[in-house]
């Protein structure tokens, strides 16, 4: 099974796969680095319950805008802290009064983040997928073609 695949990647097909891998590599590296940093933050930083107390609407230069959740939480042994999440959405992701998990650094509690999959993992996952997907689709197409005995020059 491996031998027909390797034969099918000779010549131009191997070059196409190599180009796809090289073009995708920076996305995989950046996505992996971001994913690793997120995982490390989750391992070393505490999480507490917080409450969305409002949504701050901010306009952008292109006449658009987004709602940024304003969250209140109380860190362990401290006074209440309010922060505005750095990721906005339209419509707002959270209604006032919504309970959320907050990931925070005790040394800088105002730099906290809402701890949902979308807000922590979506960007690393998308970057990694953008880097891998074109080469994976091309490789899958070549494997299927080789299994069916289709010789694509």
Image (cartoon, rainbow, N blue to C red):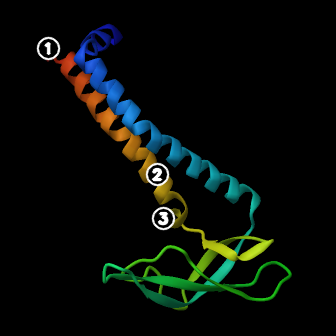
Rate crowding at label 2 as few (under 14), some (14 to 19) or many (20 or more) other CA atoms within 10 Å.
some
Label at residue 128:
none
The local crowd at label 3, few if under 14, some if 14 to 19, many if 20 or more residues have their Cα within 10 Å, is: few
Quadrant where the C terminus lies?
top left
Task: Point out the tag, 3 or 2, that comes first from the N-terminus.
Answer: 3
Which SS class for mark 3? Answer: helix
| Mark 1 vs 2: CB contact within 8 A | no
Work out whether residue 41 or residue 18 is closer to the camera in this orientation and state it. Answer: 18
Residue toward you, 1 or 93? 93
The residue that disc 2 covers is: 125
Mark 1 or mark 3, earlier in chain:
3
The kind of secondary structure element at disc 2 is helix
Give the Cα separation between the discs numbered 3 and 2.
10 Å
Q: Which residue is mark 3?
A: 118
Q: Position of residue 108 (x, y in %)?
A: 76, 73
The residue at 52%/63% (across/down) is 117
CA separation in Å, label 1 and label 3: 42 Å
Residue 47 location (% of width, % of height)? 71, 70
To which residue does mark 1 refer?
A: 151
**Residue shown at the point (77%, 79%) measured from the top left:** 75
Coordinates of residue 53 in the picture (x, y in percent) = 57, 91
Identify whether 85 is placed above or below 129.
below
- How many residues crowd mark 1 within 10 Å: few (<14), some (14–19), many (20+)? few
- Element type at marker 1? loop
């Amino acid at each position: 099974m491996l031998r027909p695949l390797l034969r099918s990647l000779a010549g131009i097909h191997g070059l196409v796969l190599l180009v796809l891998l090289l073009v995708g590599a920076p996305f995989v590296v950046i996505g992996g680095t971001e994913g690793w940093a997120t995982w490390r933050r989750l391992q070393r930083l505490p999480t507490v319950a917080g409450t969305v107390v409002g949504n701050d609407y901010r306009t952008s230069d292109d006449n658009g805008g987004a709602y940024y959740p304003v969250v209140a939480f109380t860190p362990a042994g401290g006074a209440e802290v309010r922060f505005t999440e750095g990721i906005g959405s339209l419509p707002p992701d959270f209604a006032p009064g919504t309970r959320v998990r907050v990931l925070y650094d005790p040394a800088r509690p105002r730099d906290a983040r809402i701890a949902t999959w979308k807000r922590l993992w979506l960007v690393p996952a998308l970057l990694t997928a953008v880097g891998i997907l074109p080469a994976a689709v091309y490789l899958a197409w070549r494997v299927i073609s080789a299994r069916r005995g289709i010789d694509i020059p």
